[in-house]
Amino acid sequence: MICAITLLTVPVPARADGASPLSDLVDAAAQRLQVADDVAAIKWQTGGAIEDPARVGQQLAKLAAEAAAKDLAPDYVRRIFADQITATEAAEHYRFAQWKLDPAAAPSTAPELAASRARIDGFNQVMLAQIGQRWELLHSPDCAGELGEAIRTVSDARQLDEFYRRALASATQDYCGR
């Protein structure tokens, strides 16, 4: 049931004609990053900590195991998602800083944490599938150019502000495999 709900709540990719083959992967990463606003609102209202090392460890272990089951390099996938999580935590800290400086801008309501986590899990699955589909490109000399184009295209299509553009660049910094 959660999978069905998750799939229904994952928005359509923001992809332009002629976009990079990495656009769908980068778009899923951007959407996953944007869930940080909801998660920050939840944590702001509940007094929860931004960092959750136990959950991060569980998520990275789960994603690495799923990668291995799909014949993808677990260490590569772990590194990709560690970057994603670090960028997401930075986005949450950014929102907290904004709300501390302007308490009137702080959210008065927030979605359920379970719903936000389900969205994150859905984006994780999209990203894993895209990594598998684009494996050769991600490990080719063409990767850097295609990644840069995908970041620009997605950032423009999603109208990301300067902070989220930097967060997306950070989240995708290790996509071009070594």
Image (cartoon, grey):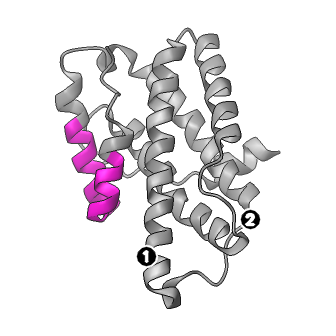
Give the residue type that dot 2 points to: Glu
Front position in the image: 161 or 142: 161
Badge 1 element: helix
Q: Residue at x 22, y 48 (%)?
A: 152
**Residue that badge 2 annotates:** 112
Residue sitting nearer the eye, 80 or 138: 80
Residue 56 placement: quadrant: top right
Return the mark for residue 98: 1
In the current view of this chain or complex, which residue is farthest to the top? 71
Residue drawn 67% across the image and 73% down it: 110
The percent coordinates of residue 40 (x first, y second) are 58, 65
**Mark closest to the chain's N terminus, 2 or 1:** 1
In front: 48, or 38?
Answer: 48
Residue 178, given in percent of the width and then of the height, sits at: 31, 14
Please check the rendered image and state whether residue 14 is part of the magenta-colored stretch, yes or no: no
Q: CA distance from mark 2 to mark 1?
A: 22 Å
Question: Where is residue 76 shown, x and y percent of the image?
Answer: 45, 18
Q: What's the magenta region?
A: 148-168
Mark 2 burial class by Cα count in 10 Å: few <14, some 14-19, many 20+: few
Question: Residue 26: which quarter of the image?
Answer: top left
Relative vertical location of residue 130 with respect to residue 41 in this rendering, above or below: above
In what quadrant of the picture does the N terminus appear?
A: top right
Classify residue 73 as left or right of residue 66: left
Q: Nearer the viewer, residue 49 or 67?
A: 49
Q: Is residue 148 rendered to the left or right of residue 103? A: left
Instruction: From the top left corner, tell me how far across and down residue 68 is, in percent.
Output: 60, 12
Q: Residue at x 64, y 12 (%)?
A: 69
Q: Main secondary structure of the magenta part?
A: helix
The amino acid type found where label 1 is placed reads Gln
